[in-house]
Image (tube, helix red, strand yellow):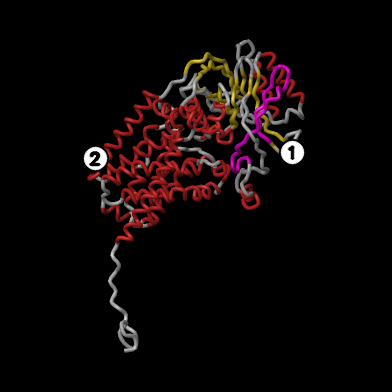
Amino acid sequence: MKTFGHWLASPWRRTTVAVLAGALPLLAFPAPSLWWFAYVALVPWIALIRSAPTAKRAAYDGWAGGFGFMVGMHHWLLPSLSVFIFVIGALLGALWAPWGALVRHFLAGTPARGRIAAALVVLPSGWLGIELVRSWQGLGGPWGVLGASQWEVEPALRLASVGGVWLISFLIVAVNVCVAVLVTIRASRVPAVAGLVATAAVTSAAWVGAPRPDSGGGTRIAVVQPGVISGPDQRFAREEQLTRDLAGQGVDLIVWGESSVGFDLGDRPDLAKRIAALSQETGADILVNVDARRSDKPGIYKSSVLVGPDGLTGDRYDKMRLVPFGEYIPARSLLGWATSVGKAAAENRRHGSQQVVMDVGHELKVGPMVCFESAFPDMSRHLAEDGAQVLIAQSSTSSFQNSWAPEQHASLAALRAAETGRPMVHSTLTGVSAVYDASGRRVGQWVGTDASTARVYDVPLATGTTPYVRFGDWTVHAALLVLLAWCATDGLRTLRLRRSAPEPRVPPARTAHGSPARPGR
């Protein structure tokens, strides 16, 4: 151990280890999907930080680990953003610098039991604070939130219905802190074991007490996935062919993927008529996604547009949260050079102003989202509050076809379904397309990235309101209160210590001409 500690004395070696340790949680996400690994993935990083010789070095270890996590989680963006992905990783990785200092503050040396107990609450709260900040759409959104790694674990999905994906993240970090203490601080095993027991008790209580969605009938929804096809005309023809095959299958709604129509339907009434004819032939409204310059207002929009047998129904949702660099460049006057080193947006798309719930007939109301909007828990929660019976995400990951991105994106729908108690349909151009029931369990099979097909799903509907929909992001608010309370308590303690410390005894100074008591003598 001493030899390894000596080896880590090199700043470059230590930084490399921190970057690799920060990237370890990636293995818990799709495509590896080693969900169980999430509960120990932070242990090497925590162990490294607590051994830092100074708080400054601990903060730097936190920064380096955050860089490794962010670059690793978004590595599939490298073909699009080129070297800019490392700039983004360095900027967002800095969010973990205070967390690194916090880890050392609580776990360095041989901390007392009270400090360990506080760490089990404060450190997960600090992690949630980071996830909250980086979840802002302008910073890339909540892609890679730690709790999202548990998308196929039923007890974790039950927790999501109570406190959203944030509650899962909190408990995962708490377990990692407990394990790190067990491994590195032998004298503090009792509070660590107590923390593990408390975590298990919370999970069990949620499993038993969380309300389950009530059955509310069912609906048949078809997903049309054309596959990798170049050119909007060729793609439209393939979608048309696949949709026509759905005639006579009794579907209630047909969903095409993101950018499934490359022309504004107001400018192309011929295309609108062809879609309307498909709707009449299949007996179902068709939800398409238009990625084009609008004919009725300036700018390019990505819009979910509903078409019925009589043509455009008037229901339209314009995407609100755009992908940074992919669909717009923040501060384009400063960062516009990104277009020269990657595939950043040549022109900023416009964003919508409000979410929309659509009545698609058959007594069915759906709430559409576009692309990575499915990563935002608040958007699906608001749609459920507004009466959506089925959540729908229209997506396209064709630029990242041979990466982990399609699986990661499809897995997010399971969490949104579990949080809201509403089934969710994730429809893509090129895969992975998937459907989940109101508990987050998969309905049928995924449509993989190698498929060009239309598939029908019997989707069970549900009623009732989950605690997460009712109370919102209470987990994050509680975490922020914990951090504020700790800051206040620690600040008061520091102030008390300064006041109670005896003043240093300094011998009386003498003047040039005599003693201080009798100056000049």
Q: Secondary structure at mark 1?
A: loop
Q: Which mark is residue 358?
A: none
| Rendered location of residue 301, percent (x, y) | 68, 35
Q: Is residue 491 above or below residue 326?
A: below
Determine the residue positioned at 59% across, 26% down: 367
- Amino acid carrying mark 1 in the image: Pro
Q: Tag 2: residue type?
A: Val
Q: Quadrant of residue 155?
A: top left
Question: Does the segment drawn in magenta span residue 404?
Answer: no
Image location of residue 394, percent across then percent down: 59, 28
Relative to 116, is 445 on the left or the right? right
Which residue lies under the disc numbered 2? 190
Q: Is residue 311 magenta?
A: yes
Please state if 110 lies on the left or on the right of 476 as rendered: left
Q: Quadrant of residue 349?
A: top right
Crowding at mark 1 (Cα within 10 Å: few <14, some 14-19, many 20+): few
At horizontal 24% and vertical 40% (from top left) the residue drawn is: 190
Q: Which residues are magenta?
A: 301-327
Residue located 26% across and 37% down the image: 193
Q: Residue 298 — which label? A: 1
